[in-house]
Amino acid sequence: MKCEELLAMLNEYVDGTVDPALCKEFEQHMAGCNPCQVVVDNVRKTITLYKAGRPYELPAPFRERLHETLRKRWRETRGGAANRQ
Amino acid sequence: MEPSDSELVRRAQAGELDAFEVLAARYERRVYSLALRILRQEQDAEDVTQQTFLSAVENLDGFRGQASFATWLFRIATHAALKVIRKRKGLKTVSLEAATEGTDPGSSIPHPEFIADWRQSPEQLVQSREIQRLLDGALARLDEKHRLVFLLRDVEGLSVKETAEALGLTEANTKVRLLRARLQLREQLTRALGDPDTRLTRDHDHVH
Ligand SMILES: [Zn+2]
């Protein structure tokens, strides 16, 4: 396996969906190729970091407006269902 | 214990507004952040967030739990965001695919250039205040088509198949974009976070 071939399979390897036979080749290449090993490690950490990132807070006035709008639309479109309970 | 999403969905479908509001409160930040990271404009992100939850109110009975409730919401939000993108580009009649397609010059994979170990672990980095700015900055520098795929797949955790469906792309195309996005973000983050002392070059490609 060449470095380019390894890169082409990177998604499957990182996501754990790579074919087991290819996985062995992939790992053999990494064992003998420090740059590829570090690239794979960097990519894993990149994904981990983005996954761990915190979402933005809604601006408070918008949040209030949003919930008000939702309640209003709920009563208009689904009020009947609630009343039947 | 917090009620599960599916429990809340069931109660909302039965007419309980409170249950729906708990769901909205649970996901509004992620929907808003997704929209903001796609569109990079607060007003547009607010509009998309509102449309998403209004659409959820109206289509709640159509939700059958094939995907998770979160995935369902992200799909609605993505469609709404793509509409904004289309409008911005003045493309009213083209498909979603074309709206995010752009030109794809060649299909070669970007070559990693700055290869080095990171100075800190993701667990340490995530504690830092500056890191979010770095992450968002790197994301903002990606092409829209790469950013969208990365956001849905890696930030929001949709599968490749779900990401492809949400964006109206083929799975093959989605995978190619995801690989490019990951490699480009790796490059940018490693330039900022990598330890230059451990930098490696690939000039002497090994022969196996
Ligand atoms: Zn290699």
Image (spheres, coloured by chain):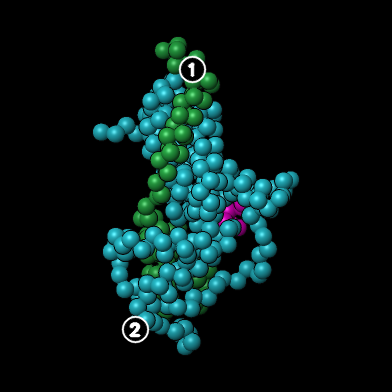
Chain colours: A green, B cyan
Looking at the figure, which quarter contains the N terminus of chain B? top left
**Residue shown at 47%/72% (left/top)?**
B187
Task: Looking at this view, name the residue that lies furthest to the front.
Answer: A61
Q: Nearer the viewer, residue B40 or B107?
A: B40
Give the camera-side residue of B65 and B40.
Answer: B40
Q: Please identify the dominant SS of the magenta region.
A: helix
Q: Residues within 10 Å of mark 2 (few under 14, many from 20)?
A: few
Rounded to the nearest angstrom, the CA distance separating label 2 from label 1 is: 65 Å
- Camera-side mark, 2 or 1: 1
Residue type marked 2: Asp
Q: Position of residue B95 (x, y in %)?
A: 69, 48
Q: What's the amino acid at mark 1?
A: Gly
Q: Are marks 2 and 1 on the same chain?
A: no
Q: Which residues are magenta?
A: B169-174
| Tag 1 subunit | A
Q: Which residue is mark 2?
A: B197
Compared across the picture, whether B46 is left or right of B200 comes to: right
Which residue occupies 42% across, 64% down?
A: B134
Can residue A32 be seen by looking at this rendering?
A: no
* x, y percent for residue B88: 65, 51
Q: Which residue is mark 1?
A: A79
Residue at 36% from the left image edge and 55% from the top image edge = A52
The relative height of residue B46 versus residue B63 in the rendered view (above or below) is below
Residue extending furthest toward the bottom:
B204
Please state which of residues B101 and B207 is positioned toward the viewer in this rendering: B101
Expressed as whole percent of the image width and height from the top left, the position of residue B109 reads: 56, 71
Residue A50 visible? The answer is yes
